Image: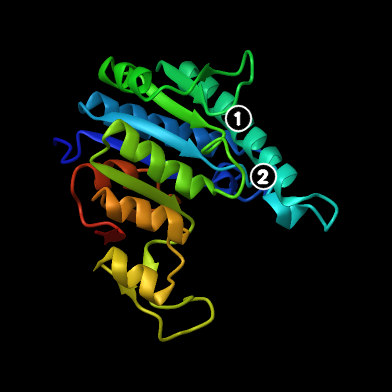
Amino acid sequence: MHPVYNRVLIKISGEALSGTKGAGFDFDFVTDVCKKVIECVGLGAQVAMVIGGGNFWRGVKDGAGKVERVSADKMGMLATAMNCLAVADVFKQCGADAKILTAADIQGVGERHDARKAVEYLENGKVVLFACGTGQPFFSTDTGAALRAAEIGADALLLAKNIDGVYSADPKKDPSAFRFEEISYAEVLERRLAVMDSTATSLAMDNSIPVIVFALAEPDNIRKVLCGEKVGTTVK
């Protein structure tokens, strides 16, 4: 089986790393995800990743009205760096080489972000982890993922979530909600569907990067999506 996408960026929420714990790490689950990514690299794909920080800090939502937005967003960037450090070590224990590139200068955590260096690492079979989002407040890690995908010339952005695709409404609240197999960027924006934030969706649209939304609960979905199997929802 061969990948239909040669170079992808996978966006994973920080909450997903915690499994059922709600915070921190479920290392059994993280290991399963890393092994699937390694399998994809073994198939010939180039894989970069952006990981959110919600298992430690959810920005201004966790600030209890005491932390300003700019500070809250910077704390979120640090949380993504912590996650990248942990995931990089799991990759190494599984026999893969993972490189951390960070949008903020944090000595000893990773190299300063450079798109050309990222592509060089990818072409040499390394997994690249992008930390600290865009490096600026007021931008989500979704936007950071879309930006990095555009910078490295990714063939697709794989959005691994806690839900198995894009729905017409919240399926937990609306029993009539249905899942789209395919939907346009414009319709996502028009309907204000909870795929990514509008900035990230617009960035993917402007750069013609298809976004595949799928459930991470089954890590093998990463391989299935990469190989072109119909999983989740495709936004294009």
The answer for how far apart the CA atoms under marks 1 and 2 are is 13 Å
Find residue 73 and name its label.
2
Answer few, some or many: residues within 10 Å of disc 1's Cα (few below 14, many 20 plus, some between 14 and 19): many
Q: Looking at this view, is 167 or 33 the one in front?
A: 167
Q: Looking at this view, is 206 or 197 the one in front?
A: 206
Assign the N terminus to one quadrant of the image. Answer: top left
Residue 158, visible in the rendered structure:
yes
Q: Tell me residue 223's x, y (percent).
A: 28, 41
Assign the C terminus to one quadrant of the image. Answer: bottom left
Mark 1 = which residue? Answer: 81
Q: Name the residue type under label 2.
A: Asp
Q: Tell me residue 204's x, y (percent).
A: 32, 51
With 201 as the anchor, is 207 left or right in this view?
left
Residue 167, visible in the rendered structure:
no
Q: Is mark 1 on a helix, strand or loop?
A: helix
Mark 1 or mark 2: which comes first in sequence?
2
Tell me the residue at 57%/44% (across/down): 14
Tell me the residue at 46%/22% (across/down): 91
Which quadrant holds residue 23?
A: top right
Q: In the rendered picture of this protein, how many numbered marks are placed on residues?
A: 2
Tell me the residue at 31%/60% (across/down): 232
* Above or below for 66 versus 182: above
Tell me the residue at 34%/46% (across/down): 158
Tag 1 near tag 2, CB within 8 Å: no
With 44 as the anchor, is 117 left or right in this view?
right
Q: Tell me residue 151's x, y (percent).
A: 33, 34
